[in-house]
Image (spheres, rainbow, N blue to C red):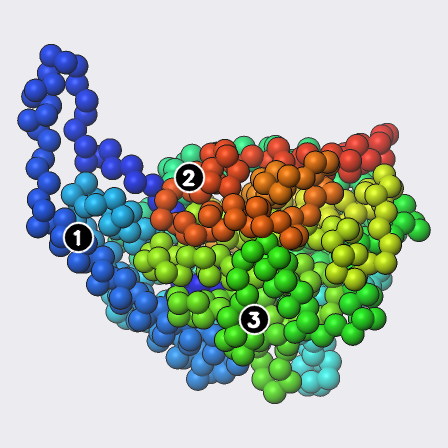
Amino acid sequence: MLSLAGVGLLAVSSGCDDSEHRPTPTQASGQTKAIAQVPAVDPAKTAQARAFIADVDKELRRLGEIEARASWAKQTDITDEHEKAAAEATAAMMAYTTQAIQGSTAFNTAEADPETARQLKLLKLSRSLPAPKDPALRDELAAIEAKLDGIYGKGKYCKNPKKPKTCRDLGELSDVLASSRNYDELLEAWKGWRTISVPMRPMYQRFVELGNTGAREIGFADMGELWRSGYDMSPAVFEQEMERLWQQVKPLYEQLHCHVRARLHEQYGDKVPQTGPIPAHVLGNMWSQSWGNLYPMLEPYKGEPSIDVSKALVAKGYDELQMVRLGESFFTSMGLPKLPETFWQRSMFTKPDDREVVCHASAWDVTNNNDLRIKMCIKINHEDLVTIHHELGHNYYYNSYYTLPVLFQGAAHDGFHEGIGDAIALSITPSYLKQVGLLDEVSNSDKAVINSQMQTALEKIAFLPFGKLIDQWRWDVFAGKAGPSAYNRRWWQLRQQYQGIVPPEPRGEDLFDPGAKYHIPGNTPYARYFLAHILQFQFHKAMCEAAGFKGPLHECSVYGSKEAGAKLRAMLAMGQSQPWPDALEKLTGTRTMDAGPLLEYFAPLRAYLEEQNQGRTCGW
């Protein structure tokens, strides 16, 4: 998860298309008249706009640091006091941002210099949760936001509420989903976690009402339109772009789904049908968003060396800090700087024994001034090693742009922020793992490649439809297409439509299953994760080309390539100061998001899946 200083800031990018303020070109015969109609730029107004943005920058930094410190305290020590302080800090930031956005309407962006004009545009898009003008409503919204986050963080399922020893938190319940193959045991853990989100339902309904009020007051139809406006294209075109990318990858997902379903049928019999959707609780993950825990069941070729280094990490005595230092060493091998000493002093690497915390991994720059941190409850396994690379990708993005104006301190668009660390993690190849001493044997045989790609696909390809549908559900909710009486129904409609999964038993509207996923109560936009899963392969291919790698894309590691690091750093340093196609072009040479590199990467696995699925009825 990405957590910016000023936790509510929405990392967005908005184009500098000021055509609504420019004269329309005319034919030569009317040219003189057209020129005469061009409004004169008032130097005084330009200077005022620049001064206004300078003041906004100072105040956003001040309030953002207060908000981020309060949020850090709340997430690393969940108490009523910290929740209250975080709510107050968020309310103050909301109040100022609302005021600043209103103040920005006094300036015509055509009268500002390009840098100021872009900041004026980004200001309007800077909050994922826009606050109402009314102070009472604003305070109510901030309190609800803090409460939702706290409910999730403190959530436990108690088989017997009178016996605390029967209570299990998300980590413990997730371990059941990951390791058990007992259908009923899985069902209990899956249903148990979803009891924690039931109290959120009325709060979330009010949360939507208040957030939409704030969005309308700054010129958007609802929060969904605000979120979709942050991609240098119209909201409607952005929706089309998401669907275009999904259609590129859907055939590969369907092949994976088909093969996984067949193996699950062998495991559970008719409880997992041979055709149709898959019950949600048997896929090894609390939200069925990644299926990597099923790999032992799905390993294509037994006896081949595994890329999973969980056992090696334990055997070699790695602790949590050493895992993070290993992640850092990848970035420094590419010529990027070491993390500041304060990172090691201020981060949370392990789950404390003396307090409740939000274990969901996140990366931070608390002061917008290189105060880098991560917050994780690290486990000594392969999955968390990859997650560390992901979170450090955020930190190195922060490190690259922290000297820019605060409104430029964000990714080219939010999918970029999520994609950087994952692109680096694609270089965690068998050859790299051997190089750092975590693998003794490397095999590039066809069978070993298929094994490795299956493991990766169970995480990355399985995730794609989930990554798309989370915000699709919220866009429908924000727009009133799925009202409070249909929250759960619409949730499961989308999950079946995109993922081909269904709940293991009927789920009524007295429940609130969306709230069992952190990003819903945490109000974190999710399209970024879908886009990141596309972009990371574009980034990876571009860095491999910069490194001079020749060979199949899935074999490339850019570890140690200063050339790849220089190209990456040049893109990161832009922040969101320019439209995202400019940033994408800086690294990849193209201005269009494309799933082609992803499909190229997984070409060996796709051929394997198509062979395995011969004679099966795929789809749902």
Q: Earlier in the sequence, mark 2 or mark 3?
A: 3
Residue at the far top in the pictured view = 29
**Res. 159 image quadrant:** bottom right
Measured in 3D between alpha carbons, the distance from the residue under mark 2 to the one under mark 3, in whole angstroms, is 31 Å
Residue under the image location 79 percent in, 56 percent down: 434
Instruction: Say above or below: 391 vs 23.
Output: below
Mark 2 is surrounded, within 10 Å at the Cα level, by few (under 14), some (14 to 19) or many (20 or more) other residues, namely some
Residue 362, given in percent of the width and then of the height, sits at 55, 65
Residue for badge 3: 375
Residue under the image location 59 percent in, 66 percent down: 361
Q: Secondary structure at mark 3?
A: strand
The circle on residue 582 is 2
Q: Taking the image as drawn, is residue 486 in sight?
A: no
Residue for badge 1: 49
**Res. 402 image quadrant:** bottom left
Q: Amino acid at mark 1?
A: Ala
Measured in 3D between alpha carbons, the distance from the residue under mark 1 to the one under mark 3, in whole angstroms, is 38 Å
Do the numbered discs 1 and 3 sit on residues whose CB atoms are within 8 Å? no
Instruction: Say above or below: 355 vs 454.
Output: below
Q: Amino acid at mark 3?
A: Lys
Residue 458, given in percent of the width and then of the height, sits at 73, 49
Residue 36, given in percent of the width and then of the height, sits at 6, 26
Q: Taking the image as drawn, is residue 597 in sight?
A: yes
Nearer the observer: mark 1 or 2; the answer is 2
Residue 287, given in percent of the width and then of the height, sits at 66, 57
Measured in 3D between alpha carbons, the distance from the residue under mark 1 to the one under mark 2, in whole angstroms, is 25 Å
Instruction: Say above or below: 175 vs 308.
Output: below
Do the numbered discs 2 and 3 sit on residues whose CB atoms are within 8 Å? no
**Res. 213 image quadrant:** bottom left
Q: Earlier in the sequence, mark 1 or mark 2?
A: 1
Q: Secondary structure at mark 1?
A: helix
Q: Earlier in the sequence, mark 1 or mark 3?
A: 1
